[in-house]
Amino acid sequence: MEITITPADLDATDVARLVEAHAAFCDDTAPPGSCHRLTLDGLRAPGITMWTARDAGSALLGMVGLGALGPLGGEVKSMHTTAAARGAGVAKRLMQILTEEATARAYPALWLETGIHPDFDAARRLYWSLGFRPCPPFGSYQHDPHSVFL
């Protein structure tokens, strides 16, 4: 599959729909207060860079963001691929772009929070394959039994 990754246009309708789909996905896996996903406005915050992946026909396949964590480094934000794109390497390509940018920014580490629900199993396997390992809550996160910190 041909995949093109570019900076996200957060004003694009399909990107807004994917952010909504990500929110619904997350909200279905954890109780209120335990889903730490960002809204579209949250993804517009200073310090967050977003990318999207599209196929040869410009169909949106996925998104990922990189947030600044000050001296800790960077945080993976709002990783999500469409159901049709799962298993096709889209998430791995998005993570490659993100890690290249983190390296260019000289971030000392990358961090992320993800869910414990079985729907996140594939994502956790990807993160593990990329070298992420469990850690305590970081930044402003607190212990949450519905979260895994890597």
Image: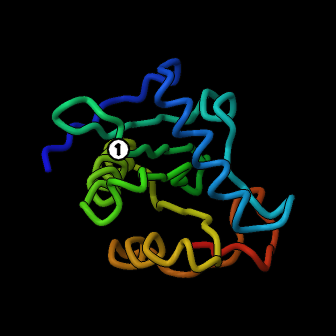
Q: How many marks?
A: 1
Residue 83 visible in the picture? yes
Left or right of 63 on screen, residue 20:
right
Question: Which residue is drawn at the image coordinates 60% and 67% (left, top)?
Answer: 114
Which quadrant of the view contains residue 129?
bottom left
Mark 1 lies on residue? 61
Left or right of 124 on screen, residue 112:
right
Compared with residue 142, is residue 21 higher up or lower down, i.e. above or below? above
Viewer-side residue, 139 vs 57: 57
Query: Where residue 26 sits: x, y (%)?
Result: 66, 58
Q: Label 1 is placed on what type of residue? A: Leu
Left or right of 141 on screen, residue 136:
left
Query: Where residue 50 sits: x, y (%)?
Result: 46, 36
Question: Which residue is drawn at the image coordinates 58% and 45% (left, top)?
Answer: 21
Compared with residue 143, is residue 80 higher up or lower down, i.e. above or below? above
Query: Where residue 32 sits: x, y (%)?
Result: 86, 59
Left or right of 65 on screen, residue 55:
left
Residue 74 visible in the picture? no
